[in-house]
Each structure stands twice: as C-alpha cells, then as structure tokens.
Amino acid sequence: IPVADAAPKTAPKTLPDAQTVTAVRHWTDSLFSFRVTRPASLRFRSGEFVMIGLLGDNGKPLLRAYSIASPNWDEELEFYSIKVPDGPLTSKLQHIQPGDEIILRPKPVGTLVLDALLPGKRLWFLATGTGIAPFASLMRDPETYERYEQVVMMHTCRTADELAYGRELVENLRHDPLLGEIYGEDFANRLVYYPTTTREESPRMGRITDNMTSGKVFADLGLPPISPETDRAMVCGSLAFNVDVKAVLEGFGLHEGANSEPREFVVEKAFVGDGV
Ligand code: FAD
C-alpha cells in the first residue's frame, strides 16, 4: 500500500493554526468572552498572551495580542474581548459562533507570570477593563494560592455591568467546593474582590490609584498598606493606568521585575492605544 494511502484522512483545517470556537457569551454591548479548542502542543504559564485572529478581507491573517483568560490546566482556552466598533479584528470577531474557526498562534509570551515575582504574603491583581483577562487565568491557577496566602483582585470599569465577567468568575471561585476542600473553608477569605466603577454610581467607586493613595482600599478591607516586605502586584490596563499604578507602587517601595529578574511587581498593557 502506498504510504500516502495509509495516512489518516482527517478533514483539512481551513485556516493556518485553526482552532474551533466551542462557546461564546456576550456580557455587554462592548464585551464578550469565548472558548476555543486548545492545540495539543500548547503549553503556557497562566497570565501569558498569544496572537489570535481571523482571515482579513485580503486573505491574510489579521492577528491581535490576547491574554489567555483560562488557567494552564484547562483543556480549552478562554478569551475575554472588547468589541471596538470600527476595530479591524473585533468588528468581525464579535460575530463568532460555536463551530467557527479562529487563528491561534501557539507561541505564548508575557510578563504577568508568577515566576517574575519574588515570594511574598499577599498578591495584588490590579486591572481596568479587559485587563482582568490574565488574572482570570491566574486566579484559577492553584499555584497562585500555593505561592501567596492572599490574593486581592482590584478591578475598575466605567460602569457596573462591565464588571460582570470578573464578578461572576470571582464569586464562583470563592465558593468553589473543590477549592474549599483543598484550601479549607476560609478559601473565600484568601481571594478578596474589590471592584469599583468610575462613572456609574455603585457601592464602591473610584480609580485604583486613588483608592490606594488615599488608603481607602486598605481601610475597607482591613489590610495594612502595601509594603515591599509582604506585598507583590501585577498590573494590566491602559498605558496611562499602567504608568500611574507603577508610580503608586514605587511610592510604596516596590520595584518592577521581569522574567529574568523577579522583583515586587510586574506590568503589562491590556491594549495599545490611549484607552480610558
Ligand atoms: P485595534 O485597531 O487593535 O484597536 C483600536 C483601538 O481600540 C485602540 O487604539 C484602543 O484605543 C482601543 N482598544 C483596543 N483594545 C482595547 C481593549 N481591550 N480595551 C479597551 N480599548 C481597546 N484585548 C482584549 O479585548 N482582550 C485581551 O485579553 C487583550 N489582551 C491583550 C494583550 C496585549 C499584550 C496587548 C498588547 C493587547 C491586548 N488586547 C486585548 C488588545 C487587542 O490586541 C486588540 O487591540 C483588540 O482586540 C482590538 O482589536 P481591533 O483590531 O478590533 O482594534
């Protein structure tokens, strides 16, 4: 028998690096999450990002950076996305349905990884908007709780409905029976959630930087102020947010680290552009 005839006859994938969409959920007019099949060879560290996209009108791949929102143990990959009205990719990507294919380059990279931080007691996740995506991965990774006694998720959006994806994820995790079994009944206290809005009235308001410099978040949570001895932080938001938070963290005596030189905090852009 010729070798070619013996080869398994699988349907050819229509896109290079194609993965199949398995689920889509729309959270607001401008936010959605989706899940895709995971390439068997893809290994990543929770918090990293990959390039994903669709074929453009010119027949060439139209790719953008996306944080993987699922933890590294998950058999599928999850993403959390903005819908930019005239955005080259997201004006199309927002219409994907289960069964559709997307392009996913299996080369994960990024600085928001536990290896880029020194050991400590408390880990702060500081995000605006879709910047919560890498933390959706890290919050679901047991290694996070093995390395740190407590995780504080601060997430800020303009309106309360923009917080929904993160809120549901955190609430489910805090009351997850399996995590409760592994880490004890007080697991809910190990994952602290501090959402705020900046435009819409809500129980908690204000920018992350303001709530830190004023001491409000520490008073509200009954925690001591951030210190380089005990606290570590990861930051993901617009460029302006990242610059402001970095200055605040440095004011508390923390230093920025990297994969090659772990320190007390790390920063990554949630997108390129001005943002809010
Ligand atoms: P683009 O031409 O890429 O963007 C148009 C404009 O929209 C930008 O100039 C910017 O002002 C605004 N914009 C783009 N992305 C966002 C955003 N996420 N939130 C608010 N405003 C935005 N996007 C995600 O939705 N989820 C992610 O997990 C994610 N991870 C990223 C990780 C990295 C390291 C980087 C650099 C970017 C990431 N982005 C993420 C942004 C993403 O790469 C695209 O910019 C986004 O999907 C929009 O693509 P587009 O082609 O429709 O518009």
Image (cartoon, grey):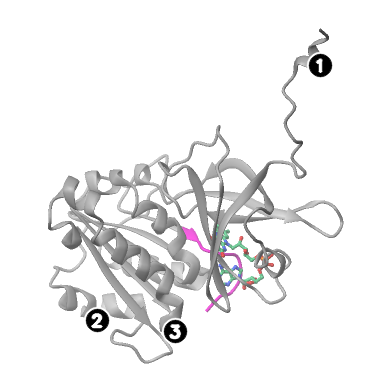
Sequence-first disc among 2 and 1? 1
Q: Specify the amino acid type for callout 1.
A: Ala
Q: Quadrant of residue 41?
A: top right
State the residue in front, 271 or 168. Answer: 168
Q: Which quadrant of the rendered structure holds the N terminus?
A: top right
Instruction: Say which residue label 3 marks.
Output: 159
State the residue in front, 80 or 263. Answer: 80
Q: Are marks 2 and 3 in contact (CB under 8 Å)?
A: no
Query: Is the stretch drawn in magenta largely helix, strand or loop?
Result: loop
Give me the residue at 40% from left, 41% from top: 73
Instruction: Say which residue label 2 marks.
Output: 214
Q: Can the viewer see residue 250 in this picture?
A: no
Range of the magenta residues?
Answer: 268-276
Mark 2 neighbour class, 10 Å CA radius: few under 14, some 14 to 19, many 20 or more: few
Per the image, is 234 magenta?
no
Q: Tell me the number on the disc at residue 4.
A: 1
Per the image, label 1 sits on a secondary structure element best described as: helix
Sequence-first disc among 3 and 1? 1
Q: Specify the amino acid type for callout 2.
A: Ser
